Amino acid sequence: MTLFSLWSNFYGRKCQFQVSCCAGVVSISLSVKFSSFLTYISRKLTRYLNWIGLPTKVFNVGEYRREAVIYSSYDFFKADNKDAVRIRHQCALAALHDVKTYLTEEGGHIAVFDATNTTRDRRDLILNFGNENGFKIFFIESVCDDPNVIATNIMEVKISCPDYQGCNTSDAVEDFQKRIECYRALYQPLDPEHDRNLSFIKVIDVGCRFVVNRVQDHIQSRIVYYLMNIHVQPRSIYLCRHGESEDNLQGRLGGDSGLSAQGRKFAVALTHFVEEQNLSEVKVWSSQLRRSIQTAEALGLPYEQWKALNEIDAGVCEEMTYEEIKEKYPEEFALRDQDKFHYRYPRGESYQDLVQRVEPVIMELERQENVLVICHQAVMRCLLAYFLDKSAEELPYLKCPLHTVLKLTPVAYGCKVESIFLNVDGVNTQRDKPEEAKKGPAVPLLQRRNSITPLTSPEPCKKLRITNMSPTPPPSPCSASALPPALPGQVSPQTYTLAGFPPPPSPQQSSDICLFLSESAEKWFRPSRGCPSLPLRPAGMVPHSFMWEVTNRTFSHVWFLMSLKCCPRFCKGRLLYMGVSIHTLHIYRNN
Protein backbone atom coordinates (compact mmCIF):
# COMPACT_ATOMS: atom_id res chain seq x y z
CA MET A 1 0.00 0.00 0.00
CA THR A 2 1.36 3.41 -0.95
CA LEU A 3 1.44 6.21 1.58
CA PHE A 4 2.34 9.73 0.66
CA SER A 5 2.85 13.27 1.71
CA LEU A 6 3.10 16.28 -0.51
CA TRP A 7 4.58 19.65 0.21
CA SER A 8 5.20 22.62 -2.02
CA ASN A 9 7.50 25.57 -1.58
CA PHE A 10 6.76 29.03 -2.97
CA TYR A 11 9.25 31.86 -3.28
CA GLY A 12 8.27 35.46 -3.91
CA ARG A 13 9.39 37.06 -7.16
CA LYS A 14 10.10 40.35 -5.51
CA CYS A 15 12.93 38.72 -3.57
CA GLN A 16 13.95 36.02 -5.99
CA PHE A 17 17.46 37.43 -6.43
CA GLN A 18 18.24 37.30 -2.73
CA VAL A 19 18.68 33.94 -1.10
CA SER A 20 18.44 35.21 2.45
CA CYS A 21 15.23 37.15 1.89
CA CYS A 22 12.73 35.08 -0.07
CA ALA A 23 9.02 34.81 0.52
CA GLY A 24 7.82 31.26 0.39
CA VAL A 25 5.08 28.76 1.16
CA VAL A 26 5.40 25.05 1.80
CA SER A 27 2.20 23.16 1.15
CA ILE A 28 2.00 19.65 2.52
CA SER A 29 -0.33 17.00 1.29
CA LEU A 30 -0.31 14.07 3.60
CA SER A 31 -1.81 10.68 3.56
CA VAL A 32 -3.13 10.54 7.11
CA LYS A 33 -1.71 7.05 7.40
CA PHE A 34 1.71 8.58 7.37
CA SER A 35 0.76 11.71 9.26
CA SER A 36 3.20 11.41 12.14
CA PHE A 37 6.13 11.14 9.71
CA LEU A 38 4.90 14.19 7.83
CA THR A 39 4.41 16.15 11.02
CA TYR A 40 7.93 15.17 12.04
CA ILE A 41 9.40 16.27 8.69
CA SER A 42 7.40 19.49 8.39
CA ARG A 43 8.32 20.66 11.87
CA LYS A 44 11.97 19.73 11.42
CA LEU A 45 12.18 21.58 8.10
CA THR A 46 10.46 24.63 9.58
CA ARG A 47 12.81 24.55 12.56
CA TYR A 48 15.86 24.30 10.30
CA LEU A 49 14.78 27.18 8.04
CA ASN A 50 14.08 29.40 11.04
CA TRP A 51 17.46 28.48 12.52
CA ILE A 52 19.39 29.52 9.40
CA GLY A 53 17.57 32.85 9.38
CA LEU A 54 14.58 32.33 7.07
CA PRO A 55 11.36 33.14 9.00
CA THR A 56 9.10 30.12 8.42
CA LYS A 57 5.68 29.10 9.75
CA VAL A 58 3.49 25.99 9.45
CA PHE A 59 -0.14 26.30 8.32
CA ASN A 60 -1.89 23.00 9.07
CA VAL A 61 -5.20 22.76 7.21
CA GLY A 62 -6.30 20.01 9.60
CA GLU A 63 -6.34 22.60 12.38
CA TYR A 64 -8.57 24.86 10.26
CA ARG A 65 -10.90 21.88 9.71
CA ARG A 66 -11.04 21.06 13.41
CA GLU A 67 -12.02 24.65 14.14
CA ALA A 68 -14.83 24.44 11.57
CA VAL A 69 -16.28 21.00 12.40
CA ILE A 70 -15.90 18.23 14.98
CA TYR A 71 -14.47 15.06 13.48
CA SER A 72 -16.77 12.06 13.84
CA SER A 73 -15.62 9.36 11.41
CA TYR A 74 -13.92 8.57 8.11
CA ASP A 75 -17.17 9.44 6.28
CA PHE A 76 -15.98 13.05 6.31
CA PHE A 77 -13.24 12.13 3.81
CA LYS A 78 -15.41 10.23 1.32
CA ALA A 79 -15.34 11.66 -2.21
CA ASP A 80 -19.16 11.55 -2.48
CA ASN A 81 -19.66 13.58 0.71
CA LYS A 82 -20.24 16.91 -1.05
CA ASP A 83 -20.73 18.96 2.10
CA ALA A 84 -17.46 17.68 3.54
CA VAL A 85 -15.64 18.30 0.24
CA ARG A 86 -16.87 21.90 0.28
CA ILE A 87 -15.77 22.39 3.89
CA ARG A 88 -12.32 20.96 3.23
CA HIS A 89 -11.93 23.20 0.18
CA GLN A 90 -12.94 26.29 2.15
CA CYS A 91 -10.49 25.40 4.90
CA ALA A 92 -7.70 25.11 2.34
CA LEU A 93 -8.60 28.53 0.89
CA ALA A 94 -8.64 30.05 4.38
CA ALA A 95 -5.19 28.62 5.08
CA LEU A 96 -3.85 29.94 1.76
CA HIS A 97 -5.26 33.37 2.59
CA ASP A 98 -3.35 33.31 5.88
CA VAL A 99 -0.26 32.14 4.03
CA LYS A 100 -0.45 35.16 1.74
CA THR A 101 -0.89 37.48 4.72
CA TYR A 102 2.08 35.95 6.49
CA LEU A 103 4.37 36.32 3.49
CA THR A 104 3.30 39.73 2.25
CA GLU A 105 2.42 41.60 5.45
CA GLU A 106 4.04 39.86 8.42
CA GLY A 107 7.60 39.51 7.18
CA GLY A 108 7.51 35.76 6.57
CA HIS A 109 9.85 34.20 4.04
CA ILE A 110 8.59 30.61 3.86
CA ALA A 111 5.27 29.11 4.95
CA VAL A 112 4.54 25.41 5.32
CA PHE A 113 1.08 24.61 3.93
CA ASP A 114 0.26 21.31 5.62
CA ALA A 115 -2.72 19.68 3.86
CA THR A 116 -3.92 16.60 1.95
CA ASN A 117 -3.04 17.76 -1.56
CA THR A 118 -3.56 14.31 -3.04
CA THR A 119 -5.13 15.25 -6.38
CA ARG A 120 -3.89 17.21 -9.37
CA ASP A 121 -6.84 19.58 -9.00
CA ARG A 122 -5.69 20.53 -5.52
CA ARG A 123 -2.11 20.91 -6.71
CA ASP A 124 -3.32 23.09 -9.59
CA LEU A 125 -5.08 25.27 -7.02
CA ILE A 126 -1.78 25.70 -5.21
CA LEU A 127 0.09 26.36 -8.46
CA ASN A 128 -2.42 29.03 -9.45
CA PHE A 129 -2.15 30.57 -6.00
CA GLY A 130 1.61 30.73 -6.45
CA ASN A 131 1.39 32.22 -9.94
CA GLU A 132 -1.11 34.87 -8.87
CA ASN A 133 1.10 35.99 -6.01
CA GLY A 134 4.47 35.62 -7.71
CA PHE A 135 5.68 32.55 -5.80
CA LYS A 136 7.94 29.76 -6.97
CA ILE A 137 6.68 26.30 -6.05
CA PHE A 138 8.54 23.23 -4.86
CA PHE A 139 6.68 19.98 -4.10
CA ILE A 140 7.87 17.32 -1.67
CA GLU A 141 6.21 13.92 -1.89
CA SER A 142 6.83 11.08 0.55
CA VAL A 143 6.03 7.57 -0.63
CA CYS A 144 6.21 4.52 1.64
CA ASP A 145 5.50 0.87 0.80
CA ASP A 146 7.30 -0.67 3.79
CA PRO A 147 4.61 -2.59 5.78
CA ASN A 148 6.62 -2.35 9.01
CA VAL A 149 6.85 1.44 8.80
CA ILE A 150 3.16 1.64 7.89
CA ALA A 151 2.13 -0.53 10.85
CA THR A 152 4.25 1.52 13.24
CA ASN A 153 2.76 4.73 11.89
CA ILE A 154 -0.80 3.52 12.33
CA MET A 155 -0.16 2.55 15.94
CA GLU A 156 1.18 6.05 16.63
CA VAL A 157 -2.05 7.67 15.45
CA LYS A 158 -3.77 7.33 18.83
CA ILE A 159 -0.94 9.42 20.31
CA SER A 160 -0.13 12.00 17.60
CA CYS A 161 -3.40 12.60 15.71
CA PRO A 162 -5.71 15.13 17.43
CA ASP A 163 -8.74 13.57 15.70
CA TYR A 164 -8.41 10.43 17.84
CA GLN A 165 -7.71 11.89 21.26
CA GLY A 166 -9.82 10.03 23.82
CA CYS A 167 -10.63 7.11 21.49
CA ASN A 168 -9.63 3.54 22.26
CA THR A 169 -6.86 2.06 20.15
CA SER A 170 -8.87 -0.50 18.15
CA ASP A 171 -11.55 2.01 17.10
CA ALA A 172 -8.93 4.61 16.16
CA VAL A 173 -6.92 2.16 14.04
CA GLU A 174 -10.04 0.84 12.27
CA ASP A 175 -11.31 4.32 11.42
CA PHE A 176 -7.85 5.41 10.39
CA GLN A 177 -7.45 2.54 7.93
CA LYS A 178 -10.81 3.36 6.33
CA ARG A 179 -9.80 6.99 6.15
CA ILE A 180 -6.65 5.97 4.29
CA GLU A 181 -8.71 4.07 1.73
CA CYS A 182 -10.67 7.27 1.05
CA TYR A 183 -7.44 9.07 0.21
CA ARG A 184 -6.06 6.15 -1.74
CA ALA A 185 -9.09 6.16 -4.06
CA LEU A 186 -8.30 9.75 -5.12
CA TYR A 187 -4.53 9.77 -4.87
CA GLN A 188 -2.68 10.97 -7.97
CA PRO A 189 1.09 10.83 -7.39
CA LEU A 190 3.58 13.19 -8.95
CA ASP A 191 4.59 11.72 -12.29
CA PRO A 192 8.06 12.43 -13.74
CA GLU A 193 6.58 12.73 -17.24
CA HIS A 194 3.29 14.49 -16.56
CA ASP A 195 4.85 16.80 -13.95
CA ARG A 196 8.27 17.21 -15.56
CA ASN A 197 7.94 21.01 -15.50
CA LEU A 198 7.38 21.08 -11.72
CA SER A 199 10.09 21.34 -9.10
CA PHE A 200 9.79 18.46 -6.65
CA ILE A 201 11.49 15.76 -4.61
CA LYS A 202 10.12 12.30 -3.84
CA VAL A 203 11.21 10.78 -0.55
CA ILE A 204 10.81 7.01 -0.88
CA ASP A 205 10.54 4.64 2.10
CA VAL A 206 11.49 7.27 4.67
CA GLY A 207 14.73 8.29 2.97
CA CYS A 208 15.92 5.04 1.40
CA ARG A 209 15.69 6.58 -2.08
CA PHE A 210 15.05 10.01 -3.57
CA VAL A 211 13.86 11.38 -6.91
CA VAL A 212 14.68 15.05 -7.50
CA ASN A 213 13.34 17.07 -10.42
CA ARG A 214 13.97 20.63 -11.61
CA VAL A 215 15.51 22.24 -8.53
CA GLN A 216 15.65 25.91 -9.45
CA ASP A 217 17.32 27.92 -6.70
CA HIS A 218 19.58 27.84 -3.69
CA ILE A 219 16.82 27.51 -1.10
CA GLN A 220 15.26 24.55 -2.91
CA SER A 221 18.67 22.88 -3.09
CA ARG A 222 19.20 23.43 0.65
CA ILE A 223 15.80 21.92 1.41
CA VAL A 224 16.64 18.90 -0.76
CA TYR A 225 20.02 18.49 0.94
CA TYR A 226 18.41 18.73 4.37
CA LEU A 227 15.71 16.16 3.56
CA MET A 228 18.36 13.78 2.25
CA ASN A 229 20.18 13.91 5.59
CA ILE A 230 17.40 13.40 8.13
CA HIS A 231 15.95 10.10 9.31
CA VAL A 232 13.26 8.94 11.74
CA GLN A 233 15.07 6.12 13.53
CA PRO A 234 14.94 6.34 17.36
CA ARG A 235 18.10 7.87 18.79
CA SER A 236 19.40 10.35 21.36
CA ILE A 237 21.89 13.18 21.13
CA TYR A 238 23.91 14.03 24.24
CA LEU A 239 25.26 17.57 24.51
CA CYS A 240 27.67 18.71 27.19
CA ARG A 241 30.39 21.26 27.70
CA HIS A 242 33.98 20.37 28.47
CA GLY A 243 34.97 20.09 32.10
CA GLU A 244 35.71 23.27 34.00
CA SER A 245 38.91 24.90 32.71
CA GLU A 246 41.52 27.14 34.34
CA ASP A 247 40.19 30.09 32.32
CA ASN A 248 36.66 29.35 33.58
CA LEU A 249 37.91 29.75 37.14
CA GLN A 250 39.22 33.22 36.30
CA GLY A 251 36.16 34.21 34.28
CA ARG A 252 38.14 34.60 31.05
CA LEU A 253 36.64 34.24 27.60
CA GLY A 254 37.96 31.78 25.03
CA GLY A 255 41.58 30.77 25.30
CA ASP A 256 42.96 27.24 25.19
CA SER A 257 43.62 26.35 28.81
CA GLY A 258 43.47 22.86 30.27
CA LEU A 259 41.04 21.36 32.76
CA SER A 260 40.94 22.41 36.39
CA ALA A 261 40.78 19.87 39.22
CA GLN A 262 36.96 19.99 39.11
CA GLY A 263 37.08 19.66 35.34
CA ARG A 264 39.06 16.43 35.63
CA LYS A 265 36.52 15.11 38.13
CA PHE A 266 33.77 15.82 35.59
CA ALA A 267 35.66 13.89 32.91
CA VAL A 268 35.68 10.85 35.23
CA ALA A 269 31.99 11.34 36.07
CA LEU A 270 31.16 11.56 32.37
CA THR A 271 32.92 8.24 31.82
CA HIS A 272 30.74 6.60 34.49
CA PHE A 273 27.63 8.19 32.93
CA VAL A 274 28.44 6.72 29.51
CA GLU A 275 28.89 3.28 31.09
CA GLU A 276 25.63 3.53 33.06
CA GLN A 277 23.70 4.52 29.94
CA ASN A 278 25.19 1.57 27.98
CA LEU A 279 26.59 3.95 25.39
CA SER A 280 29.63 1.91 24.44
CA GLU A 281 28.66 2.29 20.76
CA VAL A 282 28.01 6.02 20.99
CA LYS A 283 29.94 8.29 18.65
CA VAL A 284 31.93 10.96 20.48
CA TRP A 285 32.71 14.36 18.96
CA SER A 286 34.85 17.06 20.51
CA SER A 287 36.27 20.41 19.48
CA GLN A 288 39.96 20.92 18.74
CA LEU A 289 40.59 22.89 21.94
CA ARG A 290 42.58 21.34 24.76
CA ARG A 291 39.89 21.37 27.46
CA SER A 292 37.44 19.55 25.17
CA ILE A 293 40.03 17.00 24.03
CA GLN A 294 41.04 16.25 27.63
CA THR A 295 37.40 15.61 28.51
CA ALA A 296 36.96 13.26 25.53
CA GLU A 297 40.25 11.43 26.18
CA ALA A 298 39.05 10.39 29.65
CA LEU A 299 36.19 8.37 28.13
CA GLY A 300 38.53 5.80 26.61
CA LEU A 301 36.39 5.72 23.45
CA PRO A 302 37.24 6.67 19.85
CA TYR A 303 36.33 10.28 19.17
CA GLU A 304 36.40 12.77 16.32
CA GLN A 305 37.71 16.32 16.54
CA TRP A 306 35.67 19.04 14.82
CA LYS A 307 37.12 22.49 14.24
CA ALA A 308 33.53 23.68 13.73
CA LEU A 309 32.87 22.87 17.42
CA ASN A 310 35.53 25.31 18.68
CA GLU A 311 34.32 28.08 20.97
CA ILE A 312 33.18 31.40 19.51
CA ASP A 313 36.17 33.57 18.53
CA ALA A 314 36.23 36.60 20.85
CA GLY A 315 38.81 38.39 18.68
CA VAL A 316 40.61 41.17 20.56
CA CYS A 317 38.67 40.18 23.70
CA GLU A 318 40.11 36.64 23.86
CA GLU A 319 41.23 35.63 27.36
CA MET A 320 39.77 38.79 28.91
CA THR A 321 37.17 38.95 31.66
CA TYR A 322 33.90 40.85 31.24
CA GLU A 323 35.20 43.46 33.70
CA GLU A 324 38.34 43.98 31.63
CA ILE A 325 36.30 44.29 28.43
CA LYS A 326 33.99 46.84 30.03
CA GLU A 327 36.96 48.90 31.17
CA LYS A 328 39.06 48.68 27.98
CA TYR A 329 36.30 48.54 25.34
CA PRO A 330 33.21 50.16 26.89
CA GLU A 331 31.55 50.73 23.51
CA GLU A 332 32.01 47.09 22.52
CA PHE A 333 30.64 45.97 25.87
CA ALA A 334 27.51 48.10 25.36
CA LEU A 335 27.03 46.95 21.77
CA ARG A 336 27.14 43.30 22.77
CA ASP A 337 24.54 43.83 25.48
CA GLN A 338 22.33 45.58 22.96
CA ASP A 339 22.22 42.80 20.35
CA LYS A 340 24.18 39.76 21.44
CA PHE A 341 23.19 37.58 18.48
CA HIS A 342 24.40 39.99 15.79
CA TYR A 343 27.28 41.50 17.76
CA ARG A 344 30.64 40.50 16.30
CA TYR A 345 33.80 40.79 18.37
CA PRO A 346 36.49 42.93 16.68
CA ARG A 347 38.51 40.47 14.60
CA GLY A 348 36.23 37.74 15.96
CA GLU A 349 32.81 36.16 15.46
CA SER A 350 29.16 36.76 16.24
CA TYR A 351 26.55 34.17 17.19
CA GLN A 352 25.16 34.61 13.69
CA ASP A 353 28.57 33.65 12.28
CA LEU A 354 28.66 30.70 14.67
CA VAL A 355 25.30 29.37 13.44
CA GLN A 356 26.69 29.28 9.91
CA ARG A 357 29.86 27.57 11.15
CA VAL A 358 28.05 24.75 12.97
CA GLU A 359 25.49 24.05 10.21
CA PRO A 360 27.61 21.15 8.84
CA VAL A 361 27.60 19.70 12.38
CA ILE A 362 23.78 19.83 12.40
CA MET A 363 23.62 18.06 9.04
CA GLU A 364 25.92 15.31 10.25
CA LEU A 365 24.03 14.98 13.54
CA GLU A 366 20.83 14.43 11.57
CA ARG A 367 22.47 11.51 9.76
CA GLN A 368 23.76 9.80 12.91
CA GLU A 369 22.23 7.64 15.63
CA ASN A 370 23.47 8.13 19.22
CA VAL A 371 26.10 10.88 19.49
CA LEU A 372 27.85 12.56 22.44
CA VAL A 373 29.02 16.09 21.57
CA ILE A 374 31.60 17.69 23.89
CA CYS A 375 31.73 21.35 22.98
CA HIS A 376 31.62 24.87 24.43
CA GLN A 377 28.99 27.23 25.79
CA ALA A 378 28.30 29.33 22.67
CA VAL A 379 28.43 26.30 20.35
CA MET A 380 26.13 24.31 22.64
CA ARG A 381 23.66 27.21 22.62
CA CYS A 382 23.57 27.17 18.81
CA LEU A 383 22.99 23.41 18.69
CA LEU A 384 20.36 23.59 21.42
CA ALA A 385 18.54 26.44 19.66
CA TYR A 386 18.21 24.28 16.55
CA PHE A 387 16.75 21.27 18.36
CA LEU A 388 14.46 23.34 20.61
CA ASP A 389 13.40 25.84 17.91
CA LYS A 390 14.61 28.91 19.79
CA SER A 391 14.71 32.38 18.23
CA ALA A 392 17.81 34.45 17.54
CA GLU A 393 16.94 36.66 20.52
CA GLU A 394 16.74 33.66 22.88
CA LEU A 395 19.76 31.76 21.55
CA PRO A 396 22.62 33.74 23.19
CA TYR A 397 21.02 33.41 26.64
CA LEU A 398 20.20 29.68 26.69
CA LYS A 399 21.48 28.07 29.88
CA CYS A 400 24.21 25.49 29.29
CA PRO A 401 25.87 24.97 32.68
CA LEU A 402 29.14 23.17 33.22
CA HIS A 403 29.14 19.51 34.25
CA THR A 404 25.58 18.93 32.97
CA VAL A 405 24.56 16.60 30.13
CA LEU A 406 21.51 17.45 28.03
CA LYS A 407 19.88 14.38 26.48
CA LEU A 408 17.87 15.29 23.36
CA THR A 409 15.40 12.77 21.93
CA PRO A 410 13.68 13.81 18.67
CA VAL A 411 9.91 13.21 18.66
CA ALA A 412 7.15 13.97 16.16
CA TYR A 413 6.28 17.41 17.51
CA GLY A 414 9.73 18.59 18.56
CA CYS A 415 12.46 17.37 20.85
CA LYS A 416 12.33 15.91 24.36
CA VAL A 417 15.03 17.33 26.68
CA GLU A 418 16.44 15.77 29.85
CA SER A 419 18.97 17.70 31.95
CA ILE A 420 21.37 15.43 33.89
CA PHE A 421 23.72 17.03 36.43
CA LEU A 422 26.71 14.79 37.18
CA ASN A 423 27.19 16.03 40.77
CA VAL A 424 30.48 17.84 40.16
CA ASP A 425 30.51 21.48 41.18
CA GLY A 426 31.71 24.07 38.67
CA VAL A 427 31.75 27.83 38.27
CA ASN A 428 28.71 29.58 36.83
CA THR A 429 29.57 31.10 33.44
CA GLN A 430 26.01 32.20 32.60
CA ARG A 431 25.55 35.94 32.05
CA ASP A 432 21.87 36.82 31.75
CA LYS A 433 20.55 39.62 29.61
CA PRO A 434 20.90 42.98 31.43
CA GLU A 435 17.67 44.69 32.42
CA GLU A 436 18.55 47.79 30.41
CA ALA A 437 19.08 45.68 27.30
CA LYS A 438 15.67 44.03 27.79
CA LYS A 439 14.03 47.44 27.38
CA GLY A 440 15.75 47.89 24.03
CA PRO A 441 17.75 50.88 22.81
CA ALA A 442 16.08 54.08 21.68
CA VAL A 443 18.00 53.90 18.38
CA PRO A 444 19.42 50.53 17.26
CA LEU A 445 23.20 50.62 16.82
CA LEU A 446 23.87 48.09 14.11
CA GLN A 447 27.28 49.43 13.10
CA ARG A 448 30.23 50.27 15.28
CA ARG A 449 32.35 53.28 14.41
CA ASN A 450 36.14 53.47 14.02
CA SER A 451 36.50 49.71 13.75
CA ILE A 452 37.70 47.36 11.07
CA THR A 453 35.15 44.76 12.22
CA PRO A 454 31.48 45.59 11.52
CA LEU A 455 28.55 44.05 13.30
CA THR A 456 26.73 41.30 11.52
CA SER A 457 23.44 42.68 10.33
CA PRO A 458 19.87 41.35 10.49
CA GLU A 459 19.39 42.91 7.06
CA PRO A 460 20.41 40.84 4.02
CA CYS A 461 22.72 43.50 2.57
CA LYS A 462 26.08 44.27 4.10
CA LYS A 463 26.82 47.53 5.86
CA LEU A 464 29.48 50.05 4.96
CA ARG A 465 32.86 48.93 6.25
CA ILE A 466 34.95 51.74 7.74
CA THR A 467 38.69 51.03 7.81
CA ASN A 468 39.93 54.37 9.12
CA MET A 469 41.04 53.97 12.76
CA SER A 470 41.42 57.71 13.44
CA PRO A 471 39.52 59.27 16.40
CA THR A 472 37.06 60.93 14.02
CA PRO A 473 35.35 59.05 11.20
CA PRO A 474 36.24 60.05 7.63
CA PRO A 475 33.79 62.25 5.72
CA SER A 476 31.16 60.44 3.73
CA PRO A 477 31.84 60.29 -0.02
CA CYS A 478 28.14 60.94 -0.50
CA SER A 479 28.20 64.37 1.12
CA ALA A 480 27.53 67.47 -0.94
CA SER A 481 31.17 68.59 -0.60
CA ALA A 482 32.28 65.41 -2.35
CA LEU A 483 30.24 66.11 -5.49
CA PRO A 484 32.42 67.53 -8.28
CA PRO A 485 31.12 70.59 -10.09
CA ALA A 486 29.87 70.31 -13.63
CA LEU A 487 32.71 70.16 -16.12
CA PRO A 488 32.93 72.67 -18.99
CA GLY A 489 30.20 72.05 -21.51
CA GLN A 490 27.83 70.37 -19.03
CA VAL A 491 24.56 71.45 -17.46
CA SER A 492 23.79 71.34 -13.73
CA PRO A 493 23.42 67.89 -12.19
CA GLN A 494 20.09 66.13 -11.90
CA THR A 495 19.39 63.50 -9.25
CA TYR A 496 17.62 60.22 -10.00
CA THR A 497 16.73 57.19 -7.94
CA LEU A 498 16.45 53.63 -9.22
CA ALA A 499 12.74 54.14 -9.78
CA GLY A 500 13.22 57.26 -11.89
CA PHE A 501 15.99 56.64 -14.37
CA PRO A 502 15.99 58.87 -17.46
CA PRO A 503 15.42 57.20 -20.83
CA PRO A 504 18.58 56.16 -22.67
CA PRO A 505 19.96 58.75 -25.09
CA SER A 506 19.76 58.24 -28.81
CA PRO A 507 22.51 56.23 -30.55
CA GLN A 508 23.58 59.34 -32.45
CA GLN A 509 25.06 60.88 -29.32
CA SER A 510 28.76 60.13 -28.98
CA SER A 511 29.82 61.29 -25.52
CA ASP A 512 31.67 58.99 -23.14
CA ILE A 513 30.72 58.20 -19.56
CA CYS A 514 32.77 58.68 -16.41
CA LEU A 515 32.21 57.65 -12.80
CA PHE A 516 33.46 60.31 -10.41
CA LEU A 517 34.38 59.48 -6.83
CA SER A 518 36.32 61.48 -4.28
CA GLU A 519 39.85 60.40 -3.39
CA SER A 520 38.71 59.08 -0.01
CA ALA A 521 35.98 57.00 -1.57
CA GLU A 522 38.20 55.50 -4.25
CA LYS A 523 40.04 53.25 -1.77
CA TRP A 524 36.76 51.97 -0.32
CA PHE A 525 35.09 50.57 -3.38
CA ARG A 526 36.25 48.12 -5.99
CA PRO A 527 34.11 46.37 -8.61
CA SER A 528 32.68 43.23 -7.03
CA ARG A 529 32.66 39.91 -8.84
CA GLY A 530 30.00 39.71 -11.52
CA CYS A 531 29.43 43.49 -11.70
CA PRO A 532 30.38 45.73 -14.63
CA SER A 533 33.94 47.00 -14.39
CA LEU A 534 33.50 50.72 -13.76
CA PRO A 535 36.62 52.92 -13.68
CA LEU A 536 37.22 54.65 -10.36
CA ARG A 537 38.71 58.10 -10.93
CA PRO A 538 38.80 61.21 -8.77
CA ALA A 539 36.80 64.22 -9.90
CA GLY A 540 38.21 66.22 -12.78
CA MET A 541 40.05 63.43 -14.58
CA VAL A 542 39.52 62.49 -18.21
CA PRO A 543 36.40 60.35 -18.67
CA HIS A 544 36.67 56.72 -19.60
CA SER A 545 34.24 54.81 -21.80
CA PHE A 546 32.04 52.09 -20.41
CA MET A 547 28.49 50.78 -20.62
CA TRP A 548 26.24 50.37 -17.59
CA GLU A 549 23.16 48.12 -17.64
CA VAL A 550 20.39 48.29 -15.05
CA THR A 551 16.93 46.67 -15.17
CA ASN A 552 17.47 45.59 -18.78
CA ARG A 553 18.08 49.17 -19.94
CA THR A 554 21.52 50.33 -21.06
CA PHE A 555 22.53 53.88 -20.17
CA SER A 556 25.33 55.52 -22.08
CA HIS A 557 26.50 58.91 -23.32
CA VAL A 558 25.84 60.73 -20.05
CA TRP A 559 28.10 62.22 -17.43
CA PHE A 560 27.18 61.22 -13.93
CA LEU A 561 28.34 60.92 -10.35
CA MET A 562 27.14 58.05 -8.18
CA SER A 563 26.06 58.70 -4.61
CA LEU A 564 26.61 55.56 -2.53
CA LYS A 565 24.08 54.56 0.11
CA CYS A 566 23.32 51.38 2.04
CA CYS A 567 20.03 49.96 0.85
CA PRO A 568 18.15 47.96 3.56
CA ARG A 569 16.33 45.79 1.07
CA PHE A 570 17.40 44.20 -2.17
CA CYS A 571 16.48 46.42 -5.13
CA LYS A 572 16.19 44.84 -8.54
CA GLY A 573 19.01 45.91 -10.78
CA ARG A 574 21.24 47.49 -8.16
CA LEU A 575 25.00 47.56 -8.54
CA LEU A 576 27.14 46.41 -5.63
CA TYR A 577 30.58 47.62 -4.59
CA MET A 578 31.90 45.66 -1.58
CA GLY A 579 28.30 44.97 -0.64
CA VAL A 580 27.19 48.63 -0.79
CA SER A 581 24.19 49.47 -2.96
CA ILE A 582 24.39 52.26 -5.53
CA HIS A 583 21.10 53.95 -4.86
CA THR A 584 21.20 57.49 -6.30
CA LEU A 585 22.57 58.91 -9.55
CA HIS A 586 23.67 62.50 -10.02
CA ILE A 587 23.52 62.99 -13.78
CA TYR A 588 25.58 65.50 -15.77
CA ARG A 589 24.36 65.80 -19.35
CA ASN A 590 26.38 67.29 -22.17
CA ASN A 591 25.06 70.52 -23.66
Image (cartoon, grey):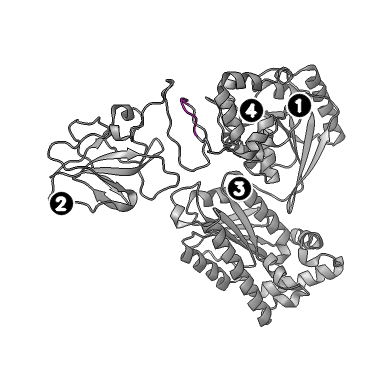
Provide the residue designation for mark 3. Answer: 50
Provide the residue designation for mark 2. Answer: 507
Which quarter of the figure has residue 408? top right
Between 239 and 390, the one lying in front of the other is: 390
Q: Quadrant of the C terminus?
A: top left
Mark carried by residue 528: none
Label 1, label 4: how far apart the Cα atoms are: 20 Å
Give the residue displayed 71% in from the left and 62% down from the top.
34
The amino acid pointed to by label 1 is Asn
Label 3, label 4: how far apart the Cα atoms are: 23 Å
- Looking at the magenta stretch, what is its main secondary structure? loop
Label 3, label 1: how far apart the Cα atoms are: 30 Å
Provide the residue designation for mark 4. Answer: 310
Which quarter of the figure has residue 182? bottom right
482 part of magenta stretch: no
Q: Nearer the viewer, mark 1 or mark 4?
A: 1
Name the N-terminal-most of marks 1 and 4: 4
Q: Position of residue 522 (x, y in %)?
A: 31, 29
Q: Nearer the viewer, mark 4 or mark 2?
A: 2
448 part of magenta stretch: yes
Q: Which residues are magenta?
A: 447-452
In this image, 500 relative to 508: left or right? right
Q: Position of residue 571 (x, y in %)?
A: 40, 49
Between 299 and 559, the one lying in front of the other is: 559
Name the N-terminal-most of marks 3 and 4: 3
Mark carried by residue 428: 1
**Badge 1 local density, few (<14 within 10 Å), some, or many (20+)?**
few
Label 2, label 1: how far apart the Cα atoms are: 73 Å
Q: Position of residue 311 (x, y in %)?
A: 64, 27
